[in-house]
Image: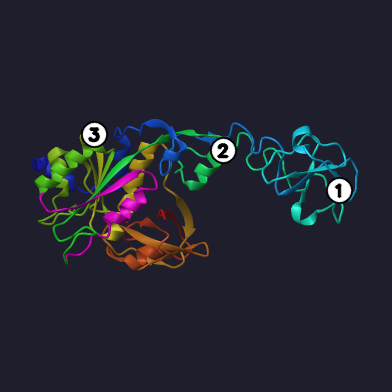
């Protein structure tokens, strides 16, 4: 990395310029492939998926019991119990046994639940008059034709798979985004590794979060070796469409991540003039975006929601960020010399500012989201802020 490149990697940009640089990047969208519905779990729908036929397609029984043919205006309590009615159909006043989900036979228009019908000498007897359409699922009652089962960009879960299969849809266009998550720091160990060093608590959390949209894999902890980090990133860029690093993003003597990115690629955003977000950045290695996150939980999560979701939105072609305009629950004065990130908890439609610090897990667990407040300003109670909500 040249001295000029090194300086660019660590220079602090206005947030608006950092966002503009990301917007200017050529980031290809994730390719679309059509797969069996059973293989689509966890992927994202590449298009809106709408039903091509109603469910059920014809009137069906909602209960085990007897299909009956009510004559218009009839209040009869006794019906002729006929055999073969499911095959031959029914005439007014007829009844035949039926099971849940079965197509009503021709001529039938109501169902008598088994527990309320009494069979006596070849007749079906009920206690009270039956209404037309009782316990019948009409066509389209479960899912109408043309109903949007899944919106474009939505993750496909078990509920969606069930609805797809029930609608007769067995193949679906999806996007498969591969992400590799790498923590750095010789002082850390990955969960499951022996030893007494502190566990990496951020990498697994981000991997779990990313799996809402991608096939994200946790690659463990890399030692503080810029050459080894650079090689790992170069190798991972060949197999993934997004890389995430955690730690080593600041200006300390053992902060090597941005140097490593510069060895095999380039930093696009090295930092911003916003407290907490400050040392996060975005780079490119062999055309693959690299999200460079600080090694403190609050900074990492804020930067992921600021830069990471912006990258994912471009790659998946669908909006992911969620915002809310809320009044402040109490006064906030920004005393830091640069714009600052504050965490907020939504309470009764208002934004309650939380005590914060770069390692405050307690505040992060409670927080609904975050907002950027301008340095030197005092925000009175009731002032409206733009809150970006955390993905939960």
Residue 266 is at least partly visible in this image: no
Measured as percent of width and height from the top left, residue 332 is found at 39, 65
Question: Would residue 367 appear left or right of 83 to someone viewing this image?
Answer: left
Measured as percent of width and height from the top left, residue 5 is found at 13, 41
Q: Report if residue 136 lies within the magenta region.
A: no
**Dots 2, 1 in contact, CB < 8 A:** no
For disc 2, the neighbor class at 10 Å (few under 14, some 14 to 19, many from 20) is some
On the image, numbered disc 1 is attached to which residue? 123
Task: Measure the alpha-carbon separation of dots 2 and 1.
Answer: 45 Å
Question: Would residue 111 appear left or right of 348 to someone viewing this image?
Answer: right
Front of the two marks 3 and 1: 1
Secondary structure under tag 2 reads: strand
Which residue is pictured at 30% across the width and 32% down the height? 26
Taking depth in this image into account, of 67 and 22 the one nearest to the observer is 67
Q: Report if residue 200 lies within the magenta region.
A: yes
On the image, numbered disc 2 is attached to which residue? 148
Secondary structure under tag 3 reads: loop
Question: Would residue 233 appear left or right of 84 to someone viewing this image?
Answer: left
Front of the two marks 2 and 1: 1
Front of the two marks 3 and 2: 2
Which residue is pictured at 8% across the width and 42% down the height? 3
| Range shown magenta | 197-225
Quadrant of image for the N terminus: top left
Residue 345 sits above or below residue 266 on the image? below
On the image, numbered disc 3 is attached to which residue? 287
Q: Earlier in the sequence, mark 2 or mark 1?
A: 1
Measured as percent of width and height from the top left, residue 264 is found at 14, 38
Q: Quadrant for residue 32, please give it.
A: top left
């Amino acid at each position: 990395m040249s001295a000029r490149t090194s300086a660019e990697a660590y220079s602090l940009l206005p947030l608006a310029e950092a966002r503009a640089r990301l917007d200017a990047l050529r980031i290809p969208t994730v390719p679309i492939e059509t797969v069996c519905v059973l293989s689509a779990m966890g992927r994202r729908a590449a298009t809106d998926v709408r039903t091509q036929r109603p469910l059920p397609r014809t009137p069906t029984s909602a209960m085990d019991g007897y299909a009956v043919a009510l004559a218009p205006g009839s209040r009869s309590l006794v019906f002729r119990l006929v055999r073969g009615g499911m095959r031959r159909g029914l005439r007014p006043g007829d009844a035949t046994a039926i099971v849940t989900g079965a197509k009503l036979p021709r001529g039938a228009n109501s169902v008598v639940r088994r527990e309320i019908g009494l069979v006596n000498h070849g007749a079906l007897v009920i206690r009270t008059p039956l209404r037309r359409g009782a316990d019948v699922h009409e066509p389209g009652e479960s899912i109408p034709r043309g109903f949007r089962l899944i919106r474009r960009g939505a993750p496909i879960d078990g509920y969606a798979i069930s609805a797809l299969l029930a609608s007769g849809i067995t193949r679906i266009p999806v996007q498969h985004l591969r992400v590799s998550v790498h923590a750095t720091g010789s002082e850390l160990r990955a969960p499951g590794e022996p030893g007494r060093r502190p566990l990496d608590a951020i990498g697994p959390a981000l991997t779990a979060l990313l799996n809402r949209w991608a096939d994200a894999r946790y690659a463990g902890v890399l030692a503080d070796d810029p050459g080894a980090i650079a090689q790992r990133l170069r190798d991972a860029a060949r197999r993934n469409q997004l890389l995430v690093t955690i730690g080593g993003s600041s200006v300390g003597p053992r902060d090597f991540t941005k140097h490593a990115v510069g060895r095999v690629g380039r930093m696009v955003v090295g930092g911003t003039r916003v407290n907490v977000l400050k040392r996060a950045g975005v780079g490119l290695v062999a055309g693959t975006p690299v999200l460079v996150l600080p090694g403190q939980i609050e900074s990492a999560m804020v930067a992921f929601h600021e830069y990471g979701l912006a990258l994912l939105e471009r790659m998946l072609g669908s909006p992911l960020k969620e915002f809310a305009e809320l009044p402040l629950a109490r006064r906030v004065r920004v005393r830091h010399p640069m714009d600052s990130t504050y965490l907020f908890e939504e309470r009764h439609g208002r934004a309650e500012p939380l005590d914060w610090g770069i390692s405050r897990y307690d505040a992060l667990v409670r927080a609904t989201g975050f907002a950027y407040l301008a340095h030197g300003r005092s925000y009175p109670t009731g002032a409206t802020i733009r809150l970006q909500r955390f993905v939960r």
